[in-house]
Amino acid sequence: MSLFETARKIYPRRVKGTFRSLKWLSMIVLLGIYYAAPWLRWDRGPHVPDQAILVDLVGQRGYFFGIEIWPQEVYLLVGVLILAAIGLFFATALLGRVWCGYACPQTVWTDLFVWVERFVQGDRNARRKLDESAWTLEKLWKKTLTHLIWLLIGAVTGGAWVFYFNDAPTLFSDLWHLDVSWSVLGWIIALTLSTYFMAGFARENVCTYMCPYARFQSAMFDKDTLIITYEAERGEPRGKHKKGESWDGKGHCIDCDSCVIVCPMGIDIRDGLQMQCISCGLCIDACNSVMDKIELPRGLIRYDTESNQRQRRDGYRTLDIAHRKSGKTVVPQQKMRWVRPRTVAYALILSTVGSLMLTAIVLRPMTELTVNHARAPQFVRLSDGSVRNDYQIKILNKSHDDRAYHLSTQGLPQARLEVLAAGDETVETLHVPANSVASFRVRVDTPEATTHGRSDIRFLLSDTQNPAQNSAQNSGKTPESARHDSYFIR
Amino acid sequence: MSDAPEPHKDIDSHSGVETTGHEWDGLKELNNPAPRWWLIVWMLTIVWAIGYWVVYPSWPTLTGHTKGIAGWTQYDKLKHEQAEITQRQSGWLGKFHKASFAEIKQDPVLFEFARAGGEVVFKENCAACHGAGGEGRRGYPNLNDDDWLFGGTAEDIYNTINVGSHSTHPNTHAVAMPAFGAVMGREGMLTPAQIDDVATYVSYLRQPVASEAFTRGQAVFQQNCVSCHGEGGIGNRQMGAPRLNDAIWLYGGDKATLVQTITKGRAGVMPSWQSRMSDDSRRQVAIYVHSLGGGE
């Protein structure tokens, strides 16, 4: 009794066809975006980096074209993650595992690595022979070259990753002069090795054993989801077929195993839908080219829905074969039900979260105020009997120019404000440099009064130079840049 | 021993694996060998441990412990880390060292450097008595308010930190409130009745309410207290005599406490910090305390 099954190595054969071309296209587009995106520029004025997509960990800012995110707004990332997840569910409900087959990095890089393997060592049979042969000089150089190219692709992959976190041109020249920090180098090495391992060795095992999405995607499937189907009614009983023989009593599947040989997951789609199937459509291309050769209509294996399959079961095999051999494909029209409760629900969630995100980004305040009441001591009694409360005030100036703010309070008419800071700062003009946070200790004094306990006060912050830019939340009163409720203890 | 039953191997019929012979409610434990990778990792950890004993200090001995060939100690590590920190601070510390209090107040970055450093030093050394935020407690001044016995400018605070109060420093603030009552078998300078009157007087200094006791107390005050506490209890910083006509009390302003203070006297102690921390640290603390809001 063995406790585990050794994974057999898969040698996918080359295939040509519609879906293979689609896969090449999506690979080129996606890899192009991945490698080129950090080099895009986006002018944001002085003081601010001009990289279109940048996660500035040191400066604690995220930049995405016209959008700028501070650590305080990191909840927007949650929205992005929700959008990504629901978007994936939506696409899955409509088109099945189209993400897995065409867009998943694991698929894309594995595809690239297999292409390298094929380029150096030849196609399926040649590769298998090479693996089984003894170590000759030829085997040595072919294997070495393959792995070298893999490592190179891995290095370029890891190298591109770090550009998203640094100014790309600067980092590139630094890399060129080998003048980079250990963290950058560490990331490059780690991602080089992970790419090399994942796309070079783990490959389909990632989808089969590691990926959680592959496990729960069936929960998003229903009978109207596009899956890869094998038309058993038409294909069975399968068997070899010689040219010119009658098809009577035979299924159209000639058992050539093309669909199995090209499958990157190493499964036989004719056994029906399986968990491993990533819906990449290569078996469709393989089967269609065989059908073309033996002059039968395409579509024995194809993208289809379970309900379509069921509806076609009756009467399909009564179609006249001779008529079909005339070159016209008489595949009954597929009917897709795009609008179903499931897809409508996903679309609704998508649009809701999307519009919430958009609102949050559009209405993003350029000034924020946070007020923390000093805890020790909660209040101070002064010589003349008046009471003082200390507050730690933080002003976030998210605009790209230096500003001065006026801080005032509401709720305690006799309150005197004073700021404790170096230089000549006063509460009438608190200077906050562009794109930064300033912290002030502000004391609020009120004369000795008869009342005791807590009183609520509200801090108001207004922008002294750009009153027009203040949000007119409370028209008629002082325009305010930000406000914050706190309390005053006697 | 000879009549001990022969141990027989119990083979589990389902898997064909020998069992350990343990059984709970019909469940038996298979005696499978540990996985090879697990065994290898385990061996490696043993090898690692032995290597560790050789390289690092590890085993206690009668006279101390084995030293290890790397010569590593926690003290060295600490020293290196401290040196690194000092190295990192040296740029600012150099600037700070040369700047006067007034100059520091004008330079936001330098001020923040001093304030932050002072806060750390304060929490380590001063918070035990003065509280984490300098809020003080009975007998220990609140450093947030505007009442200062020896002056509230940064220089004054710095000086007080240096010399302390009733400390061992030659220039320490050394004036004490004498005991006016009968203590230690000695006859008091004032009778309990007089002390009661003057306590009444002092407790009404902020908002005078004329009464007979108040008037009697006023006379006692004029004779015995004015020399230090000044006319009407305005205090005297030269002496370190507190203001008595304000709302702030170091030991308490209720009458019972005042009677106790006058009877037995007070002499608050603050150690001198001159020999306990560097001059830079003392100046940083002075700036931090000054920035708490009561500074003058």
Image: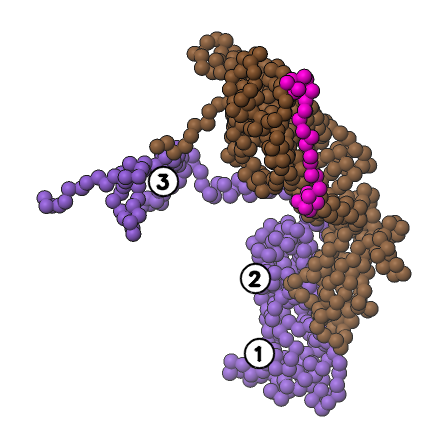
Chain colours: A brown, B purple
Which residue is farthest bottom?
Answer: B212
Q: In which quarter of the image is the C terminus of chain A?
A: bottom right
Disc 1 with disc 2 on a shared chain: yes
**Mark 3, secondary structure of its residue:** loop
User: What secondary structure is the stretch in magenta mostly built from?
Assistant: loop
Q: Where is residue A36 in the image (x, y as percent from the top left)?
A: 71, 27
Disc 1 with disc 3 on a shared chain: yes
Which stretch appears magenta?
Answer: A322-346
Q: Name the residue under label 2.
A: B128
Q: Nearer the viewer, residue B240 or A272?
A: A272
Question: Given contact means CB atoms under 8 Å apart, are the residues at marks 1 and 2 in contact?
Answer: no
Residue A343 falls inside the magenta stretch: yes
Q: Name the residue under label 1.
A: B264
Compared with A352, A252 (above or below) is above
Q: Which of B280 and A142 is in front in this view?
A: A142
Q: Nearer the viewer, residue A44 or B154?
A: A44
Residue at the image position 60 percent from the left and 71 percent from the top: B138
Figure quadrant of residue B229:
bottom right
Left/right placement of residue B12 relative to residue A300 reads left
Figure quadrant of residue A346:
top right
Q: Name the residue under label 3.
A: B66
Q: Nearer the viewer, residue A60 or B23?
A: B23
Left/right placement of residue B265 relative to residue B92 reads left
Which residue is farthest top?
Answer: A137
**Callout 3: chain:** B
**Mark 1, secondary structure of its residue:** helix
